[in-house]
Amino acid sequence: MKRALPVLTVITAIILAWYAAAVVLNAPWARDQANRSGTTLTLPALLRDTMTQERPVLPAPHQVAKGLWDGVAGQKITSKRSLVWHGWITLSATLAGFAVGSLAGILLAVGIVHSRVIDLSVMPWAIASQTVPILAIAPMVIVVFASAGITGLVPKAMISAWLSFFPVLVGMVKGLRTPDAMQMDLMRSWNASQAQVFWRLRLPSALPYLFASLKVAVAAALVGTIVGELPAGATAGLGARLLSGSYYGQTVQIWAALFAAAALAAGLIAIIGAIERVTLRRMGLAR
Amino acid sequence: MIAAEGVSLTFQTADGPVHALKDVDLTIGKGEFVSFIGPSGCGKTTFLRTIAALETPSAGQISVNGMGADDARRARAYGYVFQAPGLYPWRTISGNISLPLEIMGFPRADRVERIARVLDLVELSGFGGKFPWQLSGGMQQRASIARALAFDADILLMDEPFGALDEIVRDRLNEALLELWRKTGKTIGFVTHSIPEAVYLSTRIVVMSPRPGRITRVIDSPLPRDRPLEIRDTPEFIRIAQEVREGLREGHSYD
């Protein structure tokens, strides 16, 4: 209860502010409609109207909740109106991209830590790759792949891998370099091989850093996938849902898709957090 | 056992060369307990590290067990104890002691037997399953000594191993270290900046001074091998301590 109270307070405050914003933002349209039909709105009628519009500027929380519920539970999950179906499309590409990206990040980090040449040659490009705006790159990736006849999961996973490898790379390089001079000297005094130093010292030291960066990476992977779903008239995935919602002014649909994406990200991060806790506890690092 | 001839070591720094060691000659016989004492910057740690082949001398020769220092390192001739225990937080005490044994490829049954033996030697039996953070600083340092003993190197090199501990724990560990030395007959090289510690432990005390790092005096201790803590109040002990202090003054260590 002690922990729940502050959280509930913040959530309540957000919902109240949201309702207030919905009233303010949706009121002009309601007044406009009333003027056209030559009626005047009483305050209660105005308030009711701002929360029940078909295409509000800002849907009220309960409208979003209903939209989310309809999308998740109100449809067959194979339906194209189902958020579960769209969510799965996005999730599969996210997981594929995350797997490829993290693996690439880990392997590059191992290379960078062990070879000065790789460090000097790869790191600048890795940093440069992240300064390119993903919104500019994503359509090109989609188009190039599509012209080669590859559509669907692969190009989206490429974009999400592009975004997710970097945090893993940076976290892993930092983690693999944490052992101090004394730890390295000890290994040297035992005449340990590079492989032994890696598996017994560097890798375990890096694990806490790896988990922290995996959490950042999985969120980035999700963003990458959604961005990959926006261009070229994609028809499936949460990104496509966002896009079609904005085409047709279906703000409730946009917000429902947004919340579905947020829930997906939270779930993925929670899963990594759980694996982290179990691993670190088994390693004796959690206290 | 350990022989240094004309060993010099110069570090190139931005402010010009630093002569960490200059023309150091020293022979350490088997079973000796030799302490290195001097102010910081006198090269005592650097000298211990050159014996361990963690530094390479710019001139001179070091032989350990009849080999070059680096070959001796490869042959795992010594165990090294640092000022910090350097235990892996993700391994238990037993796991930490097992680490060098795993690296050196000892079979599992042998490892278990050796871990039990060295834990007993440093009086930590029963703590093998604990994680390092569950132990006091003194116990952690004892575990790190056990780790250095586990693979039966003849030589134990210790770089201010008790420097970070309080004096009461330090007394206790000094006593335990002497006991361990008597039992195992190891050759021990011990860096310290405490005069009583050096006199209490050593068969020979090497006094060093800085700029350039060199040996100013080597003092043989006439104290018997069997040394209760009370020996520190005897006139003999006080005389040796005085001699060490004179050696330090000679090297302008007090300037």
Image (cartoon, coloured by chain):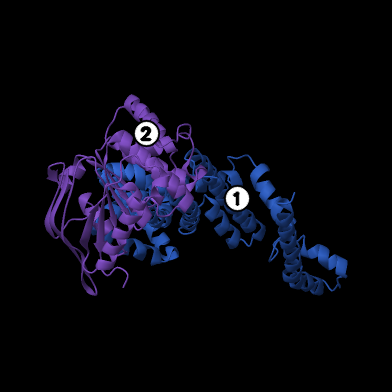
Chain colours: A blue, B purple
Secondary structure of the residue carrying tag 1 is helix
**Amino acid bearing label 2:** Val
Q: Report which residue position mark 2 lands on.
A: B118
Please report, as a chain letter, where disc 1 is located.
Answer: A
| Left or right of B224 on screen, residue A256 | right
Q: Is residue A131 visible?
A: yes
- Residue furthest to the top in view is B109
Q: Position of residue B186 (x, y in %)?
A: 27, 39
Toward which corner of the image does residue B43 lie, by quadrant? bottom left
Q: What residue is drawn where x is 21% and y is 60%? A: B215
| Left or right of A46 on screen, residue A284 | left
Q: Position of residue A234 (x, y in %)?
A: 49, 54
Query: From the viewer's perspective, is residue A82 above or below residue A219?
Result: above
**Mark 1 crowdedness (10 Å alpha carbons): few <14, some 14-19, many ≥20:** few
**Amino acid bearing label 1:** Ala
Which quadrant holds the C terminus of chain A? Answer: top right
Q: Report which residue position mark 1 lands on.
A: A263
For this rendering, which residue is in front, A104 or A169?
Answer: A169
